[in-house]
Amino acid sequence: MSKPIKGSVCLNHPNVAAVARCATCSKPICGECAQVHDGSTFCSKLCYDNAMRTGMMVDDVQRRKGMANFRRKIAIIINLLILAAIIYAGYHFYTRNKSKVDRKLQETKQAVQQKSSEAADTIRKSTVERESKYKRDRESALQ
């Protein structure tokens, strides 16, 4: 700390070369003005207090962030456990009622196929009628 900073003078003592910079505000300070706390050099008690307060805020933010990450991980684990329970319950239900489930699945499949074929027939009929009406209209317009 006794080695001068090249080209800098203490802001409090303009005739004295600066030997350090404040850890908070970066002011050049001489050995007389320097206050060393916890291995860092500060220009005043105010800068030291600001550094401590800022450090406590950073620690608090990091603690809150850690808690939020912990809660997020717990929520993911709970959701995965619920999903696993639902899958197990579904598997258990299916193995106990396989014939009923398969029969109901076949009935649903047949109903869907029937409805889709009825819809396709309806679309085909309306398309044919529209095309023939259009064709008739065009043919009559040409004559």
Image (cartoon, grey):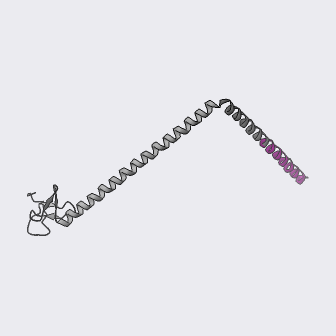
Range of magenta residues: 119-143
Q: Position of residue 48 (x, y in %)?
A: 20, 62
Q: Quadrant location of residue 55?
A: bottom left
Number of callouts in the render? Answer: 0
**Nearest the camera: 109 or 18?**
109
Secondary structure predominantly adopted by residues drawn in magenta: helix
The quadrant in which the N terminus is found is: bottom left
**Nearest the camera: 9 or 98?**
98
**Nearest the camera: 88 or 66?**
88
Q: Is residue 27 magenta?
A: no
Against 57, residue 13 (above or below) is below
Q: Is residue 25 visible?
A: no
Q: Position of residue 104 (x, y in %)?
A: 70, 35
**Nearest the camera: 43 or 128?**
43
Q: Residue at x 53, y 38 (%)?
A: 85
Q: Residue at x 36, y 52 (%)?
A: 65
Q: Is residue 140 magenta?
A: yes
Q: Residue at x 61, y 34 (%)?
A: 93
- Outermost front residue: 96
Q: Position of residue 64 (x, y in %)?
A: 36, 54
Residue 139 relative to residue 49: left or right: right
Residue 79 relative to residue 24: left or right: right
Q: Is residue 27 visible?
A: yes
- Outermost right residue: 143
